[in-house]
Amino acid sequence: MAGATELPEKGTKCLLTVNIPKPPSISPATEAEIETAATAEKGTPLSPTARLFTHPNFNCHIIAILGFAKIIAADEMKAGLQATLARHPRFSSVQVSQNSRKDKPRWVPTKVNLDDHLFYPELGPAAAVSASDHAAGDRFVEDYATTLCQTPLDPSRPLWDLHFLSIRTTEAAAGVAIFRIHHSLGDGISLMSLLLACTRKTSDLESLPTLPEARRRPAAAAAGVGAWVFLFWLWNFVVYAWNSLSGSFLYVASTFFLKDTRTPISGSEGVEFRPKRFVHRIVSLDDVKAIKCAMGCTINDVLLGVTSAALSRYLSRIYDGHLPQSLRIRTALIVNIRPTSGINALADMMKKGSDARWGNHLGYVLLRFPVMMCEDPLDYIRKGKEVAEKKKNSWEAIFTYTCGSLIVKCLGFKVITAMCHRIISNTTLSFSNVVGPTEEVSLFGSPLVYIAPNVYGHPMALSIHFQSYQNKLTMAMAVDELAIPDPHKLLDDMAQSLQLIKDAATARS
């Protein structure tokens, strides 16, 4: 394969060499095929969010690192992909733009050649080294994923690829797959539904996995009649309206002048164009649930508190124990605004008019992390819950989604792109949490050990994503090493903060 790239092991002079294939150049024949397809079929217009993700300043890609207990041979992988991903409308279409400014980019179906999307690179001595040194395998996977950030997807083909590395790591006994998907194809909820549709229960390879229960969002008003019900409804409306108004004001202010405090983890100019390092740590989901039950809160509240505690520990160490007061560190938290939340069956998501529709149906809320030093570890959960409660009882996510759509229609795509870039640049990190399968699943016959997804291409130096799978929780990070040169120490802080909070919650209960 062409395009040899040397990937240095971190902390050693030895070099691991791997051939990372360069995307094939666009041939005249391919361009003609796309043009013919565009003429023959008009295609589906890209949504405003999908168009945003294709802008150079928001050229966002999802990187999902999947660990396996058994090697999947290339023929088996091709057969599986041909029966699943290659048949999906977004994964078998290209983005086509006409010359007219009024004509929006469209998804146009094309023929998928799996040889252009599936790669089994030659690993050289790396595979042998990893057999006895699993930590070296971990570093190799990190380096390979970082190198992928510098290799763009070919726009003449569907915007995804899959790299299978036959290498042993700390968690994966047989190999690791790195699945790269352009974010315009769908959001985390859509793509997790697609992953589940491609897998089968390990206990019964003929059965689809059990989907986590999807919740329907509560209605705005309580059912019933009477003065008390009316007062309850009125009070809720006032709370929602006030929280929405204050949140929307901060959203608008962040567009123009309100910025986060500059700290060592803040991204510098051009951070969206620099490669990221992807690291992760697997912890017990049962520990998170134990804290949730002891504190009477949600899993999201726990994860917010744990992240606040970890950031406090990490920054305090950098500031030699003198953490500045009143630090403003926020995230543009992604919120699923579908009427039906949670993971849904892929068939339901692809159904026209479904509440669980496919695509990028995302709103944003600006959420502040309580960064401070607390004697009682449970204070991080209490403060995090207090901050999150205001966002839950508001329509801020719906406001940001609707506002973005209106701005696109009234002022144009360039205006909303500039606004979004400014808002994201004025916050510190991205933060998300997606529910995964509740039982062990297999992809094309190989048991899946872990799922570690993240994103790159947006103007932030730190992204933190939580992904549940079975009774495990993966804490995945994407970092700009110019801002965070020691991401594994931040992972240590995350794991230690979770343990301290769990011990305190156990003692309290």
Image: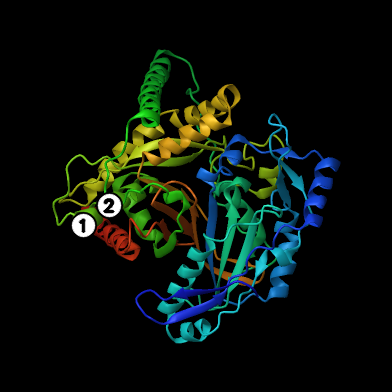
- Residue sitting farthest toward the top: 227
Left or right for 339, reference 395: right
How many C-alpha atoms fall within 10 Å of the one at disc 1: few (<14), some, or many (≥20)?
few
User: Where on the picture, by quarter, is residue 506?
Assistant: bottom left
Asked whether, in this view, residue 455 is left or right of residue 491, the answer is right
Instruction: Point out the image quarter for the N terminus.
Output: bottom right
Q: Position of residue 86 (x, y in %)?
A: 73, 58
Instruction: Tell me residue 484's x, y (percent).
Output: 33, 58
Residue 350 visible in image? yes
Name the residue rendered at 36%, 27% in the picture: 253
Toward the viewer: 278 or 284? 278
User: On screen, 478 above or below 99?
Assistant: below
Q: Residue 207's spot in the image, x, y percent?
A: 67, 62
For image coordinates 57% across by 78% down, the residue present is 166
Amino acid at pointer 2: Pro
For residue 318, the mark is 1
Instruction: Kindly state the secondary structure of the residue where label 1 is placed.
Output: helix
- Placement of 471 over or under 425, stated as above or below: below
- Horizontal side of 316 relative to 207 (left or right) equals left
Q: Which residue is mark 2?
A: 264
Residue 343 appears in the picture as rendered = no
How packed mark 2 is, by other alpha carbons closer than 10 Å (few <14, some 14-19, many 20 or more), is some
Q: CA distance from mark 1 to mark 2?
A: 8 Å
Q: Amino acid at mark 1?
A: Ile
Q: Position of residue 71 (x, y in %)?
A: 61, 77
Q: Earlier in the sequence, mark 1 or mark 2?
A: 2
Please tell me whether mark 2 sits on a helix, a strand or a loop: loop
Q: Contact, CB < 8 Å: mark 1 with mark 2?
A: yes
